[in-house]
Amino acid sequence: MVSYNDEGPAEAPVVLFIHGFPFNKSMWNAQFEALKPTNRVIAYDVRGHGNSEAGTEDFSIELFVEDLLGFMDTLQLDQVILCGLSMGGYIALSAIEKHPERFSGLILSDSQCLADTPEAIEKRMAAIESIREKGAELYVEQSIQNLFAAASFETKQMEIGNVKEMMSKTTAQSMCNTLHALSVRKETCSKLSELTVPILILVGKEDKITPPKVARLMLEKTQNSTLTIIEDAAHLANIENPHDFNQQLMEFIDRYFPSH
Ligand code: MLT
């Protein structure tokens, strides 16, 4: 069972949101509020996250892409504008590479087209071991430190609390399963030049996980794309600076997919 939110006018262009790891669909709440007067907005929980079932298979980006396409078929969505943050972007890039006809536009936030480096894989393996041995709480505490801009720990305590809660809802089993999937994901950089749809790339200025330089790499490799660096934000730019994030999102949609 896939858990999802679906709001806005049925006939308007559809924006489909994919969250990052280990979060869930509620990370898009501020984008829902901003876009739902003009767009049909849909956000779902990736397998093993939020309220979606984990199933019994090993996770992989390929499996997440199959889930996405299955979900779109169930909802009879022929074509959508796809917006993914971080892992959501990995899924989006892999989905558009395999099924370009199903997507009319792409928004990549705090994401990258690169595969994991050997060091990154090592870190994931250490995280898996630590979660298995000590539970996910410590991993959540440590991850939080890297997710937000330094100033946000003073000014965005409510948002940080919400993110922590989202992370705590993801089971240790799903965290380990997803960490493994992320560690073996394939690069998508080599196919980026084949994409013909409009692409908006966003990244928090202080993102340490997928920093502006990996966003620039995607900009260089794509045609028909723009990049905006979001101020006062790190890895979760849509949560840390929803004002600027939503403005970029709305301008992009209004420019390429006007609903009036
Ligand atoms: C995410 O936010 O989805 C993760 O940081 C992705 C990753 O660890 O590569």
Image (spheres, helix red, strand yellow):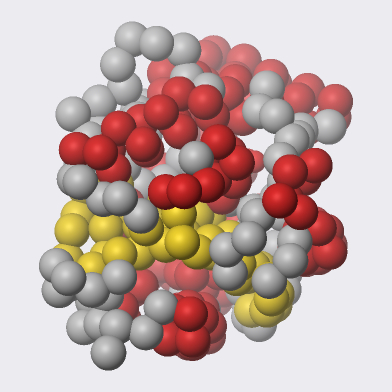
| Residue 249, above or below 188 | below
Q: Name the residue located 56 percent from the left edge and 50 percent from the top edge.
A: 89
- Classify 200 as above or below 58: below
Near-viewer residue (245 or 124): 245
Residue 41 spot, x, y in % from top left: 27, 65
* Picture coordinates of residue 44, whole percent (x, y): 29, 47
- Which quadrant of the figure contains the C terminus? bottom left
Is residue 175 among what the camera can see?
no
* Horizontal side, residue 108 vs residue 238: left or right: right
- Residue appearing at x 83%, y 32% in the figure: 117
Q: Position of residue 237 (x, y in %)?
A: 56, 69
| Camera sees residue 99 | yes
**Residue 169 falls in which quadrant of the image?**
top left
What residue is drawn where x is 50% and y is 64%? Answer: 105
Q: Which of these two is toward me, 164 or 62?
A: 62
Tell whether 130 sits left or right of 10: right
Q: Is residue 135 above or below residue 227?
A: above
Whether residue 162 is situated above or below residue 133 in the rendered picture: below
Which residue is located at x 70 percent, y 63 percent? Answer: 207
Question: Where in the image, quadrant-wise, is ligand 1 located?
Answer: top right
Task: Report the number of discs.
Answer: 0
Give residue 251's position: percent from left, percent from top: 49, 87
For the N terminus, the quadrant is: top left
